[in-house]
Amino acid sequence: MSDIQHSSSQQAPASGAVDPDELMGRVSNLPILKIVGISVALHVVLIGITSIGFLMDCSKYKTWHPDVEIRRIAKEQRAQKLLKEREDVQKKLIADQKKKSKGGTSAGTKPASSVEKNVTRKSTTLPARSGVGLDDIDDPK
């Protein structure tokens, strides 16, 4: 019985099949430290190549967190743009007020009619005083 088991375990490989020991023969002869060293070197090169843009940003902004610096600069630029727009609007309003105070009209507007003047006029009369104060309200019991 042992002859049958022994002969079946040493069967010839099927046609076109390759012996796994032959495939691993070349790799198994290399020392493990050399394999690990090659793997580490390949990983360092791959990570370095894919990080070129990040490293360039780090050197440009002189920080290890360039995204934070980029966002801060963009925020400052937006604030400066908004401030400039506000100053332009204020200058335009001041110029329009100067034109109106000289009796002229601002560009594109016509003089206000008497009805419009009455509608926009501020009232100088005070409203009548109400006879009911907050302290005068009774509890509804």
Image (cartoon, rainbow, N blue to C red):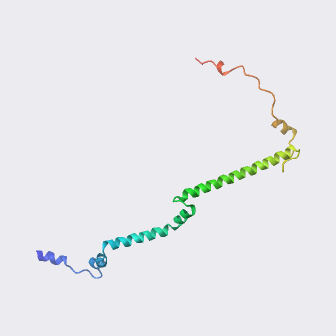
Give the position of the N terminus as an image quadrant: bottom left
In this view, the residue farthest toward the front is 62
Residue drawn at (82%, 45%), measured in percent from left and top? Answer: 97
Could you tell me residue 95's position as x and y percent?
A: 82, 48
Query: Please, is residue 93 above or below residue 50 in the view?
Result: above
Does residue 120 appear to the left or right of 141 in the view shown? right
Q: Name the one closer to the observer, 133 or 97.
A: 97
Does residue 93 appear to the left or right of 80 in the view shown? right
Could you tell me residue 59's position as x and y percent?
A: 55, 64
Could you tell me residue 120's position as x and y percent?
A: 81, 37
In this view, the residue farthest toward the left is 1
In this view, the residue farthest toward the bottom is 15
Does residue 67 appear to the left or right of 89 in the view shown? left
Residue drawn at (74%, 50%), measured in percent from left and top? Answer: 87
Query: Please, is residue 88 above or below residue 127 in the view?
Result: below
Query: Please, is residue 121 above or below residue 49 in the view?
Result: above
Query: Please, is residue 124 above or below residue 69 in the view?
Result: above
Residue drawn at (46%, 67%), measured in percent from left and top? Answer: 47
Could you tell me residue 34's position as x and y percent?
A: 34, 73
Residue drawn at (16%, 78%), measured in percent from left and top? Answer: 7
Which quadrant of the view contains residue 102? top right
